[in-house]
Amino acid sequence: MMNTESFYKKLKGSGLLLILLFFAVSCEDFLEENPSTSIDADYIYTTEEGLKSGVVSLYKFERDRYQKSTEDFMGAVLMSSRSDLAFSRTGYTGLMGRYERGVSPVDQGANFVSSLFWKHFYNMTNKATAIINAAEVAKGIDEDVKNQVLAEAKFFRAHSYFYLYRMFNNIYVTTETVTVENAFDVVNDKSSEEEIFTLINSDLDFAVKNLEWTNTFGRVTKGTAKHVKAKVAMWQGNWTEAKNQALDVIEGPDSPHSLVSSTAAVFDGDRNNSESLFVIQAEDDLLGGGNTTMINANYVTQYFQISGIEANIEQGGRGFSRILPNLYLLNLLAEDPNDTRDDDTYFRLKYYYTSGDRIGEELDDYAPITDLDNPSSDYARYYQRMHPSCIKFAQEDDNPDSYLNRSNITVYRLAETYLIAAEAIMRSTGDPLPYINAVRTRAGAKAVTSVNQQTILDERARELAFEGQRWFTLKRMGQDVIDFQITNYAGDGEYFPANLGTKDPRTNWQPHYINWPIAQIDLDLLGPDFPQNDGY
């Protein structure tokens, strides 16, 4: 087998720079007769080192979605703003979360979505496909290396098409490499659901078969592929397949994965623990260590604006207070007083003075509004400065004086695998209680004695909120579910904004928002008959 340790280190090494530049060139650059880089396509597509470096570049592009330097890093936080669990307070993420933008093919929100999702994931699928097709015909390459390259590239192609399908519904899939000869061919129709899932499952099957259970943290493994395979099966209603894949990750004889002992340990340190299935890696003061991000800042309040308290990592770092847990989510967490997930692990409910005469005392400048007939001017400042925060993305080596930090980010973890297993078993055969209760027991919460769809929804909210999964869960469960959850729970209803009813996501919601609009700038590049999603 290849040396995976040295393979992964390429992601952080300066030696990869030219490779990444090659993959990042524009179409015009690609069509130039004399490439400006010293590394040509023959190296990338026909040599062992070139193919391995090409795979590493896929990790770099995946990391980019979490570390965009534009659009306020919405690529990582936007999906959390549009859910039944979030209060989207301000900024463009607020507009998107309240369904004021991103609701038309021609508004600026759709253009952001085009860049951060449609173009990003099609870029990924194109790069992965080029690597796959080249590796399959490459000569003189070690068979184990070839299968590793193919497995990782196929995982990323499946991962990308799966994301696109869940967001946009009307998508096209292909296994054809983009070349000079076909670069300007237009796509005339969407792919059928059967075509989409056939390709996704074929790629994931290969990945499951050829990836190892263990690898350097940051690389996808058999467990990663099986977890995504289970998620795909859930979307197809194949509950037995979802159950089998999830249980193999949870309790298979070769699986190295286990839940960490406490909620405090889930996001502690660098997140590289036994529960991790895929973690975006970043490192300070290292060329290739990744860009800074405002992910944490978007989720944490501006408590430091209050006299007598300074921003500090223990209370979440320097926040911008854009996307906050709403009353619905906070009430779910509060149902069991012993649940530790709102005990400064996943969420922080209280803040404390750090200087002056009241060091260590709880802040009490203002409180949440309880009398809706007489709201004071303090209600807005409460949401901005004292509202509970999600602190899943705060990291102990972050800079508390900056909105920008460089941190590892968990994409997939075992707790979700447990909840997938519980739901799949509930919908097929077996006892789901051990799997949902494993998550609850770890959090200190009382075990449940029965499981239905709402039980699953509620537990996924408590455990996985703000990790980018909620929107897709609601959509997967159907139009009635997403309509009910959004119109009853999104935002904070009458609590805030007080007199801005048209900006309430509950009243702004329309059923066709279940699919995002394909931006007109993207639709114009497709065939004249390519269908926009219904309602736009």
Image (spheres, grey):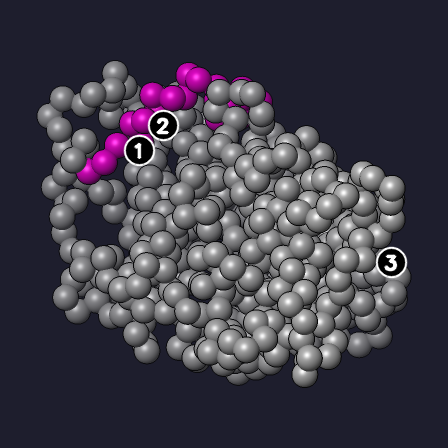
Q: Position of residue 516 (x, y in %)?
A: 38, 66
Q: Label 2 to label 1, Cα distance in Å?
A: 6 Å
Residue under circle 2? 20
Q: Quadrant of residue 533?
A: bottom left
288 over 211 or under it: above or below:
above
Residue under circle 1? 24
Q: How many marks?
A: 3
224 over 79 or under it: above or below:
above
Q: Label 3 to label 2, Cα distance in Å?
A: 45 Å
Q: Please, what is the dominant secondary structure of the magenta stretch?
A: helix
Q: Are marks 3 and 2 in contact (CB under 8 Å)?
A: no
Identify the amino acid type marked 2. Leu
Task: Quarter of the image for the N terminus: give it.
Answer: top right
Image check: 2 left or right of 376? Answer: left
Q: Position of residue 467 (x, y in %)?
A: 60, 54
Identify the amino acid type marked 1. Ala
Q: Give the extent of the magenta segment.
A: 3-27
Local SS, label 1: helix
User: Dot 2 surroundings within 10 Å: few (below 14), some, or many (20 or more)?
Assistant: some
